Amino acid sequence: MRDGSENAQRMLTVRDPVCGMTPTPDTPHRLLYDGDEVLFCSAGCKAKFAANPARYVSHGAHADCKRDHGGALLAP
């Protein structure tokens, strides 16, 4: 089980997969992708990702990310 500081550190490394910015932890721009919650910096980035997730995340990279970063999607 992760403690709060580990979870906070992971949140610092989360990147919007569309633009690479760091979304705030309380962002309302979220969606589920492959069983994981993805955070976005804006409604525009969320809409772009929702329209074509494969453009922003390869399945191999997503699997590696889930293993290495607890499911947080990071910019390439």
Image (cartoon, grey):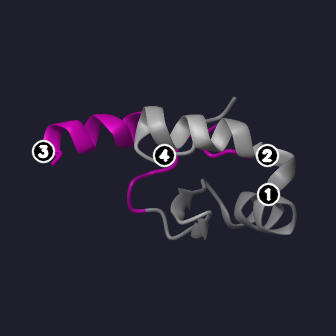
Disc 4 designates what residue? 72
Give whichever of discs 3 and 2 has the lower sequence position. Answer: 3
Calculate the distance from the C-alpha at mark 1 to the C-alpha at mark 4: 15 Å
- Segment tinted magenta in the rendering: 1-26
Secondary structure at badge 4 equals: loop
Residue 15 drawn in magenta: yes
Could you tell me residue 28's position as x and y percent? Answer: 50, 70
Callout 4 touching callout 3 (CB < 8 Å): no
> Residue drawn 86% across and 68% down?
51
* Secondary structure of the residue carrying numbered label 1: helix
Badge 4: residue crowd in 10 Å (few <14, some 14–19, many ≥20): many
Q: Amino acid at mark 3?
A: Asp
Measuring from the top left, give residue 44's x and y in whole percent.
76, 63
Q: Which residue is mark 2?
A: 56
Going by the numbered disc 2, the residue's amino acid type is: Tyr
Do residues under tags 1 and 3 come within 8 Å of each other at their CB atoms?
Answer: no
N-terminal of the two: label 4 or label 2?
2
Residue 39 spot, x, y in % from top left: 54, 57
Say which amino acid is labelled 1. Pro
Tag of residue 53: 1
Secondary structure beneath disc 2? helix
Residue 14 visible in image: no
Picture layout, residue 18 above or below residue 35: above
Q: Nearer the viewer, residue 63 or 29?
A: 63
Give the residue type that dot 4 points to: Ala
